[in-house]
Image (spheres, grey):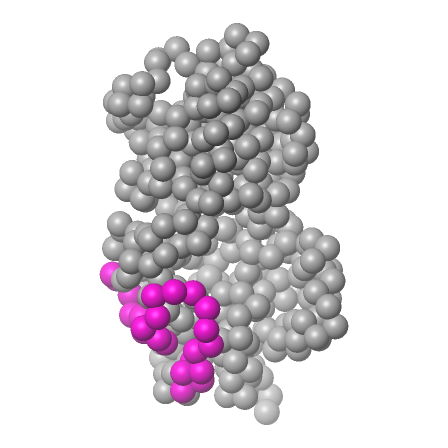
Amino acid sequence: MKPNVVMLVSHPIQYYVPIYRWLAAQGDINLTVLFHNRVGVTKSFDAGFGREIVWDLPLLEGYKYEFLSDRSESGGICFSVVSALYRINPDVLLVHGYHDVTNILAVLASRLMGVPVLMRSDTKPTPQNMNPGLFKGALKRLVFKQVDYFLSIGMLNRKFYLQNGVPARKILFSPFSVENNFFTLDGNERVWRRKQTRLALGISDSEFVVLSASKLIKRKRVSDVISSCAQLQAEGLPMCLLIVGSGEEEMSLRAQAEMSGAHVVFVGFKNQTEIRDFYAASDVFVLPSELEPWGLAVNEAMASGLPCVVSDQVGAAPDLIEGKGTGIVYPCADLLGLAEALRRLALDRPLLLSCGSRALQLIADWDNSVCAKEFRVAIALAVKKDQQHSAAV
């Protein structure tokens, strides 16, 4: 008999949807995805981007789903999650994150029902996460005790669980991933997209293009990239900084770019089907963030064949960049370190090409298909553990 599996997540997320489809297509589980709200499929205001957005990929095809509310904004408690769980009567619950009250309700309800719980989050050790305060700390410990297995997305996430007292035997691996095939272009198509995009943006073939693609908010530290690129251009390096994204910092970043005299091109927010053109047009991707739990744009860039320069506060750095030959990690907020990393890649073409090639090779093991298979393993373990418990009782 096929187990009933419920996945609980805040809203339809473009990175996760292929995983749902893959699991549903296997035919050996009955999957239902419960969403808190309709963000992503209904046009809604995104505070980070500073504008209304709706993703231009189909997010609700190929799997069974339900919405716990009709809200088109984040936040709020969905008490209906309890009745939904009792109605579906799952054999396994996989919940994304532990901070949200709706998720906590689902975990507690599942334990009362005797349903095994899997948990996945992108949390990494930070002073705030490791010392959340008396009440939040007690609540976290209570929730963690109800979880049968934790799905770690990478090294720092695993370290977070271990430092919070989770036994290593309860931590499984499920890589934080994107749909690699969507971003990996064959040689001819990449060359064509590179040429056409640069032509449209007024970027010459000879310029070394640095790509920054993120929400334009303070913690992303896009101003660091502008400063470092301006320094390199002042040294005479023919380069251009391409900034994709929007947000509250956009006006100040534009002013900074203008004052620097550097060649900086702002293209605004770009949807999923558009973003590939900008990866194709670029030579290197930069993510200078602080407080970055992971940074899935790094996955996208690597799947596009780009070397990556990231700060040491990016969660993906230990797994995908540091010591991997796929790019360079520098200390967050170190403008000279960022400039030196970009200088090395701009002046050493063999290094640039080697990093891009290794990026493609490494990221093949971090595809959504790999993640989905690990989900399947975790579900099977949870079902087996529950069956063993039932037999013992």
Magenta segment's dominant SS is loop
Residue 313 drawn at (x, y percent): 64, 42
Residue 258 drawn at (x, y percent): 46, 23
Residue 53 drawn at (x, y percent): 32, 52
- Residue 326 quadrant: top right
Q: Residue at x 44, y 19 (%)?
A: 263
Residue 241 in view here: yes
- Residue 59 quadrant: bottom left
Q: Residue at x 68, y 54 (%)?
A: 125
State the residue in front, 81 or 62.
81
Q: Residue at x 51, y 10 (%)?
A: 237
Relative placement, left or right, of 125 versus 371 is: right
State the residue in front, 202 or 353.
202
Q: Farthest residue to the bottom: give it.
A: 393
Judge whether 287 appears above or below 307 on screen.
below
User: Start and end of the magenta stretch?
Assistant: 61-83
Q: Residue at x 47, y 45 (%)?
A: 248
